[in-house]
Amino acid sequence: MGALPEILLPFVADPRHSALCLDFDGTLSPIVSDPVGARPWPGVPDLLTRLAARFALVAVISGRPADFLHEVLGSPPGVTLVGLYGLGQVGPDARPWEPVIAGVVDRARAEAPSGIYVEPKGLTVTLHWRHAPETGGAWAQAFAAQEEAGHGLQVHPGRMSLELRPPLDVDKGTVVRSLVEGMRAVAVFGDDLGDLPAFDAVAELAARGVAVARVAVIDAESDELVAARSDLVVEGPAGAVALLERLAQAAAISG
């Protein structure tokens, strides 16, 4: 399957002190027109299990609810699944925002033009306009700006989507920092702007002497910032899964 990139060699040399933090949509799963239908690339649950048997931490950190991740990945043994960017782990600070988000969902469903998919996630809501590419983005931006001003929510751009979240200091970067304390090598795989806080988190670790790898999983839709802030670029979920397979095989050979 080819030689492992040099930047990942420290992970093979010391897997018991190495962490792999992986996005789901666009990284372990292809981007699909209907978000409900997203499923992992073939073989991913088994691959995650094999990686978890070798590395100190294998975590899937996603904007999807944790229940969704468990459903589609099957709860691979030893793999940490974190949904909603870690918002579900915040506890009492997050709960008051649930009715606020529920109200946003109701208003969005009532007002959205044809082609807009409103994806409720409990503590967040995403507005998708993949089925209305010419007009949906403008409506979603106007609606999100209204909700941001009226309820103090934060607006986060994604792939042909906008997500509304509570104004809490929680993102993929805070999740990574909480999970990788004491690791000597940390890799983050991601494809979208929501993964950049995780890229930033490992950049801070690099300044403290930790071996890091920021892997951008890109395609024709990808924002150029993702590749620009990365150390290594692969093509889509197929490239990400192939690289992780090489990493699993190299770790198994190293013992």
Image: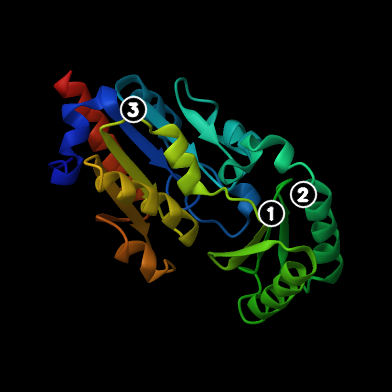
Q: Say if mark 2 contacts mark 1, CB within 8 Å.
A: yes
The residue that label 2 is drawn on is 97
Q: Please say if 217 is above or below 134.
A: above
How would you rate the neighbour count of disc 3 (Cα within 10 Å): few for under 14, some for 14-19, many for 20 or more?
A: many
Residue 89 visible? The answer is yes
Instruction: Specify the label residue 51 is tagged with.
Output: 3
Q: In this view, does 138 lie above or below 180?
A: below
Q: What element carries label 1?
A: loop
The amino acid type found where label 1 is placed reads Pro
Between circles 3 and 1, the one closer to the viewer is 1
Query: Residue at horizontal 47%, vertical 20%?
Result: 77
Secondary structure at badge 2 equals helix
Q: In this view, does 166 lie above or below 88?
A: below
Is residue 24 in view from this perspective?
no
Q: Mark 1 points at which residue?
A: 166
Number of the front mark, 2 or 3 = 2
Quadrant of the image occupied by residue 154: bottom right
Q: How far apart are marks 3 and 1 (CA)?
A: 33 Å
Q: Is residue 82 left or right of residue 3?
A: right
**Distance from the alpha carbon under mark 2 to that under mark 1:** 6 Å
Sequence-earlier tag: 3 or 1: 3
Quadrant of the rendered image containing residue 149: bottom right
- Measuring 29% from the left and 30% from the top, which residue is drawn there? 18
Pointer 1 local density, CA inside 10 Å: few below 14, some 14–19, many at least 20: many
